[in-house]
């Protein structure tokens, strides 16, 4: 059989030119192998924003990268969580040896989450694997500034400096992490799926939705305390507080309230039930004390909802006061009630703010736009020496 090189030589190409031509043809014929990536974080079934981000990124990036997810946390008691951690650790060691990934993408928060992920950072770097650390913790500043002594702070900074890139989800968090002198940071916000516009009918009864982990940090109790003040101004309001966390305590607080029939606390919702809550709401509220870049607000905005929230973490980069929502001081129950009742009473502002919410999300935080930024980051690390 006559080789391709011989045929090219007979066609008048020299030896070097023929060899280069064969290499070019081979490169075209051989499909480019997708770089291998290990993504570490909570199980994709865990309730919370980090799992939502993981699922969206895996879906969007799998066309160009071989993304293998390793779970390091599950819902449940301490023993179940401990078993999940060691199972994830063994899984990661096996994959890092047998698959030899180009990089490891590690989602972390604060406290126990950070210490768990530090082990994976060390193991990856010992094998010479590139590491992206992806910061999510809404209270990482409290963890570092208040709860950690000098030695712990040294360990935290050392771990973050060993990473190749640190992904931060807002400008506020970028400034915070850079003040610690860590590895180079890259600002990439959380993604959200594009939704079809909702046609909300004009009606007197209007629904206020809160979606997230119910408890003190996200301001659930402040909203409950504000409800009678809101109903005194706008008696047609209804309230839905959906999420996990301190669900039973929230329900107990309503037990003896004369207006308890105006409030629904369904617990954690997912799938079509979750989407239905967004579609049927008129206003989204999240009066948090600490935040990263909350998925609840992103999802609400994707459905064209105006937002009442607080100027903490990355929220001001989502909710622009007076454009698509109102920001109130955390813990200001009276101010929260005034903001919510004022929005409910003004249907034109509800609509215009909602339209702005959807525009902001679709032009900046939509999944394909955010995924493209991760693709560029992945490619830059996979091709660098």
Image: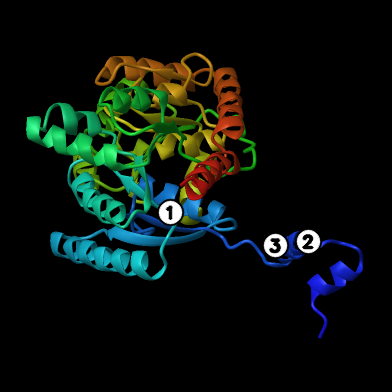
Distance between mark 2 and mark 1 Cα atoms: 55 Å
Residue 49 or residue 11, whichever sits in front? 11
Within 10 Å of disc 1 (Cα), the crowding (few <14, some 14-19, many 20+) is few
Q: Is residue 367 above or below residue 22?
A: above
Find the residue positioned furthest to the bottom.
1
Which residue is disc 1 drawn over? 270
Quadrant of the image occupied by residue 220: top left
Q: Which badge, 3 or 2, is on the more N-terminal residue?
A: 2
Within 10 Å of disc 2 (Cα), the crowding (few <14, some 14-19, many 20+) is some
Distance between mark 3 and mark 2 Cα atoms: 10 Å
Residue at 51% x, 32% y is 282
Find the residue positioned furthest to the right.
11
Q: Which badge, 2 or 1, is on the more N-terminal residue?
A: 2
Residue 254 or residue 75, whichever sits in front? 75
Residue 56 or residue 8, whichever sits in front? 8
Check if mark 1's residue and mark 3's residue have beta carbons within 8 Å: no
**Is residue 88 left or right of 234 when viewed as pictured?**
left
**Is residue 303 left or right of 24 when viewed as pictured?**
left
Residue at 83% x, 81% y is 2
Front label number (1 vs 3)? 3
Distance between mark 1 and mark 3 Cα atoms: 46 Å
Q: Is residue 173 above or below residue 280?
A: above
Check if mark 3's residue and mark 2's residue have beta carbons within 8 Å: no
Front label number (2 vs 1)? 2
Residue 157 or residue 213, whichever sits in front? 157
Which residue is disc 2 drawn over? 21
Within 10 Å of disc 3 (Cα), the crowding (few <14, some 14-19, many 20+) is few
Q: Is residue 258 visible?
A: no
Which residue is disc 3 drawn over? 27
């Amino acid at each position: 059989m006559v080789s391709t090189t011989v045929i090219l030589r007979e066609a008048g190409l020299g030896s070097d030119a023929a060899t280069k031509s064969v290499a070019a043809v081979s490169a075209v014929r051989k499909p480019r192998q997708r770089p291998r990536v290990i993504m570490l974080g909570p199980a994709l079934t865990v309730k919370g924003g980090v799992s939502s981000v993981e699922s969206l990124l895996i879906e969007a990036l799998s066309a160009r990268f071989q993304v293998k997810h390793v779970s390091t946390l599950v819902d449940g008691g301490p023993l179940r969580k401990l078993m999940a951690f060691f199972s994830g650790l063994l899984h990661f060691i096996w994959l890092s040896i047998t698959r030899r990934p180009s990089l490891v993408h590690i989602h972390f928060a604060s406290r126990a989450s950070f210490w768990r992920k530090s082990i994976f950072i060390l193991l990856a770097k010992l094998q010479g694997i590139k590491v992206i650390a992806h910061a999510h913790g809404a209270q990482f500043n409290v963890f570092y500034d208040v709860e950690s002594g000098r030695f712990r702070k040294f360990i935290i900074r050392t771990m973050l400096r060993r990473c190749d890139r640190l992904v931060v989800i807002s400008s506020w968090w970028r400034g915070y992490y850079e003040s610690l002198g860590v590895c180079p940071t890259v600002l990439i916000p959380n993604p959200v799926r594009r939704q079809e516009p909702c046609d909300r009918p004009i009606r007197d009864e209007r629904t206020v939705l809160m979606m997230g982990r119910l408890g003190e940090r996200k301001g659930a109790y402040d909203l409950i305390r504000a409800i009678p003040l809101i109903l005194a101004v706008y008696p047609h309001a209804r309230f839905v507080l959906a999420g996990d966390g301190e669900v039973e305590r929230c329900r107990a607080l309503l037990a003896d309230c004369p207006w308890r029939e105006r409030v629904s606390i369904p617990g954690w919702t997912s799938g079509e039930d979750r989407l239905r809550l967004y579609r049927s709401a008129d206003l989204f509220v999240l009066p948090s004390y600490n935040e990263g870049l909350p998925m609840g607000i992103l999802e609400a905005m994707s459905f064209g909802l105006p937002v009442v929230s607080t100027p903490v973490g990355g929220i001001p980069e989502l909710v622009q006061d007076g454009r698509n929502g109102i920001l109130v001081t955390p813990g200001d129950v009276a101010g929260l009630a005034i903001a919510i009742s004022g929005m409910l009473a003004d249907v034109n502002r509800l609509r215009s703010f909602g339209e702005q919410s959807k525009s902001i999300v679709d032009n900046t935080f939509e999944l394909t736009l955010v995924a493209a930024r991760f693709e560029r980051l992945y490619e830059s690390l996979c091709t660098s020496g």
